[in-house]
Image (cartoon, helix red, strand yellow):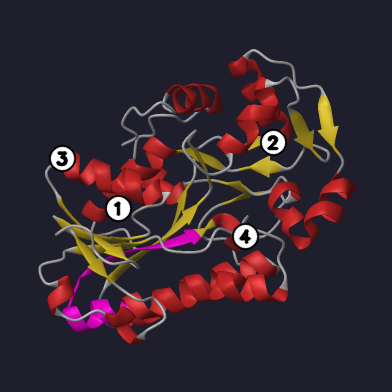
């Protein structure tokens, strides 16, 4: 296959690009800087059709659109919220327009389990409605931006990703230092659910979706066994052989982070129903082995 990837320098995009290249597929990286190699094409997410021409996407079998400003990149001020929306919704509209003009048949579009909002201990799958709050609204509009692609006959799979576990980026590196120092702590009550997935499984699931013509619409990219924040804290401490005796009060997190504290205190117990029903096999369905593999991988072993 020839696969174009936005966000190809990020944690997930770079791991996917390596995995595809290792198996002999061709990768086209859509970058926002001056191209540095023949496998890169410059695009501008803020321009109509991303500034891309039909020739730029010539021969591309699928686009994996992973671009988007990090949700945990700062307090959710009005200005920051606009950045988060534009980096997802406007960029998706641009890539959809470019794909439609170039007749690219498949789009794997970034999304998130933020769609469901705070669901407490209720198990949710892809049939659950959108929740409430900024993140749920953001993800709902993000997925809606792919609807013109579906209307044009493009097969769209919306990747509702959970917390991706890797020592190379995302949440885990921010936890490793305090936990290694014996300062590990649960957040708030610790009863809130965390829906996670190993980076290797996230990459494998995207590759699975590229090959499965019958899979379209929302797909939860989460492991089959979500855990509570308390369980995550206990398992990470055990993996590192360190104590984790502390609690960061919910009130302190709300004071320090404002509305963004919902990322740590909100609960989502998502089930990857569509992947399981399609027969996808997780390499790391349980948290303990996933954490051990992620921590052991931080020195550069292949992630895909």
Residue 217 picture location, percent across and down = 39, 65
Category of crowding for the residue at label 2, using alpha-carbon neighbours closer than 10 angstroms: few (below 14), some (14–19), many (at least 20): many
Lower position in the chain sequence, tag 3 or tag 2: 3
Residue 189 picture location, percent across and down = 83, 38
Q: Residue at x 71, y 47 (%)?
A: 264
Disc 3 versus disc 4: distance between alpha carbons?
35 Å
Tell me the element at label 2: strand
Disc 1 versus disc 2: distance between alpha carbons?
28 Å
Lower position in the chain sequence, tag 3 or tag 1: 3
Tell me the element at label 4: helix
Q: Residue at x 40, y 80 (%)?
A: 93
Q: Is residue 56 above or below residue 285?
A: below
Along the viewing direction, whichever of 88 and 156 lies nearer the viewer: 88
Disc 3 versus disc 1: distance between alpha carbons?
16 Å
Residue 160 picture location, percent across and down = 48, 56
In the rendered structure, which segment of residues is drawn in magenta? Answer: 96-111
The disc placed on residue 209 is 1
For residue 288, say whether it is visible. yes
Q: Which residue is mark 4?
A: 116
Query: How many badges with numbers are in the image?
Result: 4
Category of crowding for the residue at label 4, using alpha-carbon neighbours closer than 10 angstroms: few (below 14), some (14–19), many (at least 20): many
Please identify the quadrant where the N terminus is shown. bottom left
Identity of the residue furthest to the top in this view: 241
Along the viewing direction, whichever of 186 and 108 lies nearer the viewer: 186
Q: Is residue 61 above or below residue 181?
A: below
Q: Is residue 178 left or right of 103 when viewed as pictured?
A: right
Pair 3/2: label in front = 3
Lower position in the chain sequence, tag 2 or tag 4: 4
The disc placed on residue 228 is 2
Q: Which residue is mark 3?
A: 23
Lower position in the chain sequence, tag 1 or tag 2: 1
């Amino acid at each position: 296959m020839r696969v174009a990837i936005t966000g190809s320098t990020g944690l997930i995009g770079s791991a996917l690009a390596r995995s595809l290249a290792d198996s002999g597929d061709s990768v086209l990286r859509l970058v926002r800087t001056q191209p540095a190699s023949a496998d890169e094409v410059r695009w501008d997410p803020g321009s109509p059709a991303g500034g891309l021409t039909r020739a730029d996407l010539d021969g591309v079998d699928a686009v994996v659109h992973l671009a988007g400003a990090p949700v945990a990149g700062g307090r959710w001020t009005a200005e920051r919220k606009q950045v988060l929306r534009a980096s997802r919704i406007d960029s998706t509209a641009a890539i959809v327009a470019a794909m439609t003009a170039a007749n690219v048949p498949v789009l794997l579009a970034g999304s998130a389990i933020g769609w469901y909002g705070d669901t407490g201990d209720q198990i949710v799958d892809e049939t659950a409605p959108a929740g409430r709050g900024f993140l749920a609204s953001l993800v709902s509009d993000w997925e809606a931006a792919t609807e013109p692609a579906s209307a044009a006959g493009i097969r769209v799979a919306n990747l509702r990703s959970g917390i991706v576990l890797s020592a190379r980026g995302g949440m885990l590196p921010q936890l490793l230092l305090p936990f290694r120092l014996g300062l590990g702590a649960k957040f708030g009550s610790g009863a809130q659910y965390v829906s996670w997935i190993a980076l290797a499984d996230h990459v494998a699931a995207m590759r699975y979706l590229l090959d499965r013509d019958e899979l379209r619409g929302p797909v939860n990219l989460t492991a089959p066994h979500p855990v509570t924040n308390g369980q995550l804290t206990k398992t990470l401490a055990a993996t590192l052989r360190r104590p984790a005796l502390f609690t960061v009060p919910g009130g302190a997190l709300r004071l320090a982070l404002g509305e963004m504290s919902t990322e740590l205190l909100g609960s989502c117990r998502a089930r990857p129903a569509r992947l399981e029903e399609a027969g996808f096999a997780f390499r790391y369905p349980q948290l303990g082995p996933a954490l051990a593999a992620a921590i052991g991988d931080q020195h550069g072993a292949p992630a895909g």
